[in-house]
Amino acid sequence: MPMASTRGRAGARGENLAHRIYEQIKQDIFGFGLLPGDRFSENEIAERMQASRTPVREALLRLQREGYVEVLYRSGWQVRPFDFEVFENLYDVRIILETAAVKRLCEMEAAPAGLADLKRIWLVPAADRLDDGSTVSALDERFHEMLVEATGNAEMAQIHHGITERIRIIRRLDFIKAPRIEATYTEHGKILRAVLQRRCEQSQLLLKTHIEESKAEVRKITLHMLHMARRPLEEKASG
């Protein structure tokens, strides 16, 4: 076997391992296994992942570029503390993108196929609504992404997806409480009906109000809430 081919395969395995480590750490952050401000070392991650420090460092550098973690001089790494002003700014950008998206959807001659999928999920009887917070959180995320994707503007969808990734940890906290789950079904239903009926201004207003309410919840989030969100996971692991 040519040496270059062997090196190529080894490099691909290293890249795949670094990607898996990257995904796992990011999931730990989104799932409250790692909280903002938590510190850790490359050695700790390498030992847990049963990997060398090289792919761990590659994964952490990628997470650093994306704003999830930061390196501490001579002290390892930490999950980046919350900057609530940044989160609020991201919600403002969401409003601009999503209201532009529903305006475009209302102006289309035929409703995109993606809206039919949203109808099956959100326009259901109250008895058929899901009540698991993590499941509804994921569906909520896809509702907003699918509205943007349905416009057919791939660049807009890519920008929107990047914002969605960055606010996911905050967004998930919004679904710990049952009333927020019920409100999400109600509000999504109203937005979707307005879009399907081509009521552009109403759909934009409903969507703007819906996102601003989520933005207001961001202001109420504290480190205590994050620790409380982690507790069910710890209890499940020890049970």
Image (cartoon, rainbow, N blue to C red):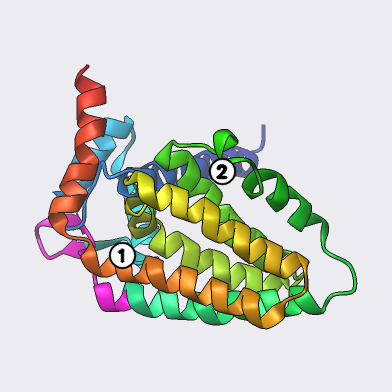
Q: In which quarter of the image is residue 62?
A: bottom left
Q: Quadrant of residue 157?
A: bottom right
Q: In this view, does 168 lie to the left or right of 2?
A: left
Image quarter in which the N terminus is found: top right
Q: Which amino acid does label 1 sit on?
A: Glu
- In the rendered image, residue 117, in percent from the top left (x then y), is placed at 73, 49
Task: Establish if 198 lies above or below 55.
Answer: below
Image quarter in which the C terminus is found: top left
The residue located at (81%, 79%) in the rendering is 107
Disc number lying in front (1 or 2): 1
- For label 2, the SS is helix
- Find disc 1 in the rendering and name its residue: 217
Neighbour tally class for label 1: few under 14, some 14-19, many 20 plus, Cα within 10 Å: some
Badge number at residue 12: 2
- In the rendered image, residue 235, in percent from the top left (x then y), is placed at 20, 26
Residue numbers of the magenta segment:
71-86
Between 136 and 201, the one nearer to me in the picture? 201
Badge number at residue 39: none
The residue located at (45%, 55%) in the rendering is 183
